[in-house]
Amino acid sequence: MDSDAAAAAAATDAALALDRLQITENTNTEEDVAESASSIPECKPDASAPILLCDAFYGFPIQKRPRNERVRAVSRQLTNFLQWRSEASLNKKKINHSHVYVLGKGKDCESVKARVDELGTQTKASTKEIMFQPDVEIHQFLDQQKRAHESVKEEFVYLSPDATYTLPTTCRPPRIVIVGMLIDRRITEDRSRRRAEESLNIRAAKLPLDELRVKELSSCEPLNVDTVMELMQRWWWNCDRVEERLQQINGGSKTEGDSNAEKYSQLYKKCFIEAAAYAMKSQRDRHPNRTVHKTE
């Protein structure tokens, strides 16, 4: 079996496995929340909105034609995410959108912004929801966030399928998640991890995709940028919903004790599983022949 046929077969198997999960929008039922509501876990929502920080400082070729292809690819992925979020938000109330920032070299940022604006006129995407910050370095941005939220212990990670560390599912994810704008036809192993840990000295983390228990899908799977962004937004939304309900049940108070630690862990785990399953189904819909990129 050639590589394309193997990828198509794996994609079909993954799609069927995802369907078998039978995830619904109400995975985190109010009954689950009520049963676990005698205390609030330590993982509480931050005072400020979460941030998807797009690293566009690398991956853009110098040559005109490859660079234009990269600009179009990155712009399409960002627009896909914005369009999905716009449609997904229609029937949701009191949702907390993540802020989306794109950091990169001046010319690259300007080119991507122009293309995103162009695509926005053709779709339902609200391109004003992306904040482009040309020539602002990653650490500059993170330092700004630390100063703005001195009372909050700021946590951030750089997502990479090659990381040794895996994000836990027992609490909400970090408030700031950095996503590399690597969109290549061929997978380059370890590139995003080296960018994070060797170039930026930022902890790399992979998504806990093994929790889905889909044979063809592992935590080392390099997901598309739009899929990663959708997964993170869904994950934050789900955690917000659960924590808000817990607060309502407890009257805003927090009691001590860890007797419900396991129940809380299960609630948070459901938050991730639902987010990941729906994001993977979106990836399948957008790329039916490449639901997964890595095959054995």
Image (cartoon, rainbow, N blue to C red):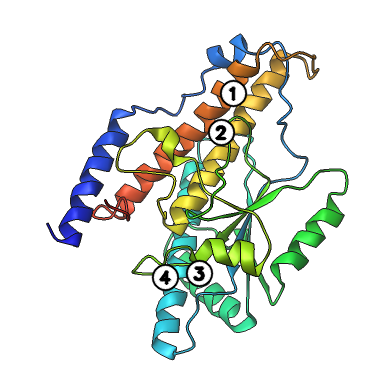
Q: Earlier in the sequence, mark 1 or mark 2?
A: 2
**How far apart are the alpha carbons under marks 4 and 2?**
31 Å
Q: Nearer the viewer, residue 238 or 158?
A: 158
Q: Are marks 4 and 3 in contact (CB under 8 Å)?
A: no
- Outermost residue to the bottom: 63
Instruction: Work out whether 125 lies above or below 264.
Output: below
Q: Residue at x 51, y 23 (%)?
A: 28
Label 1 Cα neighbours within 10 Å, binned few <14 / some 14-19 / many ≥20: some
Q: Position of residue 144 (x, y in %)?
A: 81, 61
**How far apart are the alpha carbons under marks 3 and 1?**
39 Å
Label 2 Cα neighbours within 10 Å, binned few <14 / some 14-19 / many ≥20: many
Please, what is the three-letter code of the amino acid marked with disc 4? Ala
Q: Earlier in the sequence, mark 2 or mark 3?
A: 3
Q: Nearer the viewer, mark 3 or mark 1?
A: 1
Q: Earlier in the sequence, mark 4 or mark 3?
A: 4
| Residue 34 visible | yes
Which secondary structure lies at badge 4?
helix
As drawn, is 35 to the left or to the right of 222? right
Q: Position of residue 48 (x, y in %)?
A: 75, 45
